[in-house]
């Protein structure tokens, strides 16, 4: 009952209200990123949603598209801008995903939508993380975020799939605000974001 009826309604109402409330922050971020990124403000990418169905996620662009002599993107730590570091560390880069929630592609709470190429690398158990809509924040996010190893992250994602409830979502939402304020788990050890998931072999 909660997952299929009440949660989508709460997602829509809360996301729309929050998007309106934080609109001044979004406008200022657009201005600063436009200056830092030569007019390139938004990051749009295909990600797997419910049951692995692709959708286009929207975020603020915190990195330049700087490439090496072979045409390959430089590591994250060389591409992220100064304003990008602030936007990422305060989780402002995630705010535009409220639009994805309003559209129905995502939920406020759920496993984070990762890369399309990861779909074929999951074990059958790990693939269960796609049995629910992906979220802006989730059980793995509030228990370590990018500082977690992949096995732990996926275990927590699947645990959420099995245990999700209104009270669990409320707990995750409260923990998210605390983690954002403390800037906890922003990056993996030695990386700006998270290392690539290469499968279970």
Image: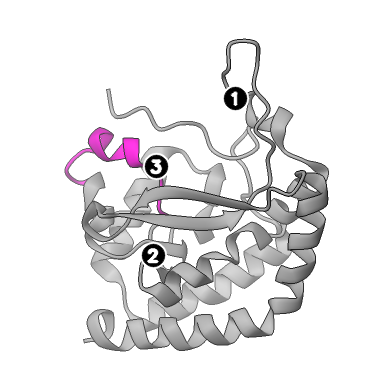
**Image position of 90 (left or right of 139):** right
What is the magenta range? 112-125
Residue found at x 68% / y 48%: 40
Secondary element under disc 3, as helix, strand or loop, is loop
Camera-near label (2 vs 3) is 3
Dot label at residue 73:
1
Instruction: Report the quarter where the N terminus lies.
Output: bottom left
Asked if residue 138 can be seen in this view, the reply is no
Residue 55: x %, y % from top left: 35, 56
- Please give the residue where the numbered disc 3 appears in the rendered image: 115
Above-or-below relation of 20 to 138 = below
Q: What is the distance, in whole Å, between disc 1 and disc 3 at their CAs?
A: 16 Å
Camera-near label (1 vs 3) is 1
Q: What is the distance, in whole Å, between disc 1 and disc 2 at their CAs?
A: 30 Å
Residue found at x 51% / y 32%: 195
Instruction: Report the quarter where the C terminus lies.
Output: top left
């Amino acid at each position: 009952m909660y997952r299929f009826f009440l949660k989508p309604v709460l997602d829509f109402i809360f996301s729309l209200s929050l998007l309106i409330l934080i609109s001044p922050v979004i406008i200022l971020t657009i201005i600063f990123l436009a200056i830092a990124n030569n007019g390139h403000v938004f990051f749009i990418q295909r990600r797997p949603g419910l049951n692995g169905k692709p959708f286009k996620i929207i975020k603020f662009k915190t990195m330049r598209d700087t490439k090496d002599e072979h045409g390959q993107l430089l590591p994250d730590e060389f591409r992220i801008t100064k304003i990008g570091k602030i936007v990422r560390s305060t989780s402002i880069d995630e705010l535009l995903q409220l639009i994805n929630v309003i559209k129905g592609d995502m939920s406020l709470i759920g496993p984070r939508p990762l890369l399309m190429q990861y779909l074929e690398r999951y074990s059958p158990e790990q693939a269960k993380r796609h049995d629910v809509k992906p979220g802006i924040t989730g059980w793995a996010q509030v228990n370590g975020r990018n500082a977690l190893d992949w096995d732990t992250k996926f275990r927590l994602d699947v645990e959420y799939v099995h245990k999700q409830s209104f009270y669990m979502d409320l707990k995750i939402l409260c923990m998210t605000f605390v983690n954002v304020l403390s800037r906890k788990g922003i990056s993996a050890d030695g990386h700006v974001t998270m290392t690539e998931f290469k499968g279970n072999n």
